[in-house]
Image (cartoon, rainbow, N blue to C red):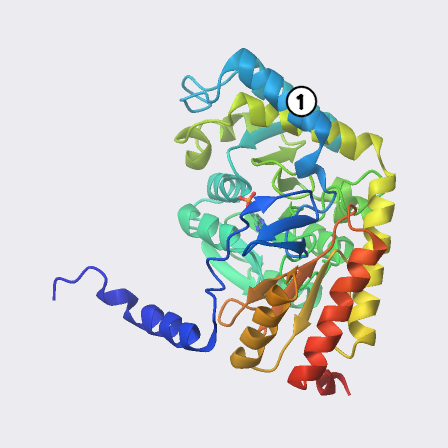
Amino acid sequence: MNDIFAKHAALKAARESLAALSPRDPFALTIERPISATVGVIEGRETLLFGTNNYLGLSQSPRAIEAAAETVRAEGVGTTGSRIANGTYALHRELERRLARTFRRKHCMTFSTGYQANLGAISALAGKDDYLLLDADSHASIYDGSRLSQAQVIRFRHNDPDDLDRRLRRLSDTPGARLVVVEGIYSMTGNIAPMREFAEVKKRHGAWLLADEAHSFGVLGENGRGVAEAQDCEADVDFVVGTFSKSLGTVGGYLVSDHDGIDTVRLCSRPYMFTASLPPEVIAATLATLDELESRPELRTTLMDNAARLHAGLRTAGLVTGSHVSPVVAVTLQDVPQALAFWNALVEAGVYVNLSLPPATPDQNPLLRCSVMAAHTPDQIDRAVAAFKTIGAQLGVSKLAA
Ligand code: PMP
């Protein structure tokens, strides 16, 4: 009756049945020590890292490390306060000005994580009388922000502008603002949004468009501004949300926009107002990696070459991957026992990737989510592909693609 954990019984049982099939806990794997961007020590072994979001390899940037070390000595390790109380330093302002310039937008707000950026943007922009139209494969932070907003949530089919159009048409006589939320690159599958088509639909219906470019900033577009830049429709994207924890290699999140209403969002976005601000050394490191992102466009070229190499290699190995070529390449497997066996064998072969299991995967298929970095060498990619090929053959997985 009074067991507060009783509601977790099904989850506990599911975890126990996974443990019976897997020699190691896929949700508790520890990187004992990162050695470089691409290699870490796991279970005492040097392991190739193919399951991070460190797309440009900048988490290990010597310039960022130096900037963080200098700043931590000068300003201390944390702010102990929220942005609207006692947690705004000159560095927060500098980073916001800098990001606004990068995105060529008037306004920028920074948040303590990317998760909070979505929570804070969506919950403040949409109110209880508004409608949120979410791509069905949206990240948890988008769904959680929607709940916090109390707006009515309508999901449309993943990457389907026609379905969005139909759903907006049905709302044509209802009052309230409509905010459409899509991602640039989808984190699990590597799918890329048809942003320009979404922008056309939103214009037709007088809706607003928010793009979460978490996985596409620093990756796509001539200047790395993401899918909206790559598809030449930035002017029609009202709000861009993103994170520092992927191509920028640090931690934190942001919202940029040209709409002046953003100034008032600072005073009603609870995930912005009621949490401690970013520590100064993180900001210093982020400013340094942002410099690199902007001054080293060749990183993006190498990244996309590496993405093409990994994608083609896995396909040639007979595995089933998505059709979009992006730094996220997901291998679809048949069932959970096979996925667990495959993932464990990869770890034992010195290759780390992410295991994603239903119900957390888009099509209810288990996925081995691989991600590539600009810092990977062709040889590292070929070694990872070779491990996939050998294990796939041993487990009889290669037949899937036939
Ligand atoms: N949006 C998307 C699409 C993401 O994939 C993630 C994290 N995986 C986030 C937001 C949250 O970012 P962070 O981890 O920096 O909080």
Identify the residue shown where x is 22% and y is 66%: 6
Give x and y (percent) for residue 233.
79, 46
Identify the residue shown where x is 45% and y is 56%: 152
Question: In the drawing, does residue 294 fall left or right of residue 65?
Answer: right
Vertical arrangement, residue 2 with respect to residue 367, above or below: above
- Does residue 365 show up? no
Vertical arrangement, residue 168 with respect to residue 184, above or below: below
The residue under label 1 is 66
Comparing 63 with 268, the one in front is 63
Secondary element at image label 1:
helix
Amino acid, disc 1: Glu
Identify the residue shown where x is 79% and y is 59%: 381
- Does residue 58 show up? yes
Image quadrant in which the N terminus is located: bottom left
Identify the residue shown where x is 54% and y is 18%: 72
Give x and y (percent) for residue 309.
84, 61
Question: In the drawing, does residue 124 fall left or right of residue 339?
Answer: left
Comparing 267 with 390, the one in front is 390
Give x and y (percent) for residue 173.
54, 58
Image quadrant in which the C terminus is located: bottom right
Task: Give the image quarter of residue 198.
Answer: bottom right
